[in-house]
Amino acid sequence: MSPLDIALIVLAVLVLLTLYMAVTIVPQGYNYTVERFGRYTRTLSPGLSLVTPYIERIGSRMNMMEQVLDIPSQEVITRDNATVMVDAVAFYQVLNASAAAYEVAGLENAILNLTMTNIRSVMGNMDLDELLSNRDVINDKLLRVVDEATSPWGVKMTRVEIKDISPPTDLVEAMGRQMKAERLKRAEILESEGRKQSAVLEAEGRKQAEVLQAQGRRDAAFLDAEARERSAEAEAKATELVSDAVARGDVAALNYFVAQKYTEAVTNIGSAPNSKLVLMPLEASSLIGSLGGIGQLAREVFGDTPVTPPSEAPAPSSQPPRFRVPRSGRKQDEA
């Protein structure tokens, strides 16, 4: 092989190597930085790009997709001196490839240490109870603080999440006892409230019942008084009519009035439930005279016969007969 052939082969290899160095293919989701003699000049976006061989070179290949950074477990001392183990995870995305490549050395390590430091700072200013019940608040604070710190690096922190908070075993047992005591306290309070409400409702019921009974007694008393008033008015009216009739010389009404009262008195005496032996004087002649007056008054009312004064009733005997009604198992001599 002649020297010319060797030179041509070397030249062809150099040309091919130059073309290979000039053509750069950037995959989707990445950005490449270009350096000329070690100085940053531009950023290559995804696709086919050309660089000047031997003068320019690819500096950093930056992943522009959202990435996940696992935060290792660490101990955190809360404001009330409780020690807990905390696990977290962070999500970030590079927005400026040149800033992420040249503003910080070791981007992932910087984000990792920054996040861990802020976790201790944020969670150390909170009590244990607040720490366990306000994870959303902790996540928001961490995200705001870490995103502000990484903004000059061309990085956007999308999420910072607390995965797990693990208190010591003895502290967990103490919290369990505290929760049990709190629930027992609430149960006793609810039972007391229930008994109180029941007593109040029962008292209100008794009060309303007594009020209704008092109103009923009052209404009944009013009705009884009204009935007695009406009865008295009727009695007075009847007495007035009888008095007027007697004043006119008509004694039939008086006989009717006396006979009615006499009959009612005899009926009441005979219907008494506690009377086994009843002794009463019965003046037959007076009763017959009263009945005659009743008949005369009826004839006067219905107009069957003209009104004539009834004959005087025969005088009662000086010794009226008495009737004896024997009691069960006993005998009574005549008086």
Image (tube, helix red, strand yellow):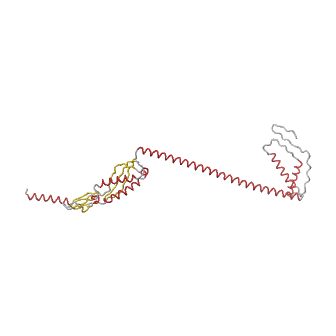
- Residue furthest top in the image: 329
Q: Position of residue 170 (x, y in %)?
A: 42, 43
Q: Position of residue 95 (x, y in %)?
A: 31, 60
Give the image location of residue 281, x and y in percent. 87, 45
For this rendering, which residue is in front, 83 or 238? 83
Please tell me how many numbered marks the rendered image carries.
0
Residues 90 and 221: in front is 90
Q: In the drawing, does residue 50 fall left or right of residue 140?
A: left
Task: Give above or below for 158 relative to 166.
Answer: below
149 on left or right of 227: left
Q: Quadrant of the C terminus?
A: top right
Is 16 on the left or on the right of 294, as rendered?
Answer: left
Q: Is residue 275 left or right of residue 203?
A: right
Nearer to me, 210 or 334: 210
Q: Which quadrant would the N terminus be assigned to in this image?
A: bottom left
Q: Is residue 314 above or below residue 43?
A: above
Front residue of 298 and 139: 139
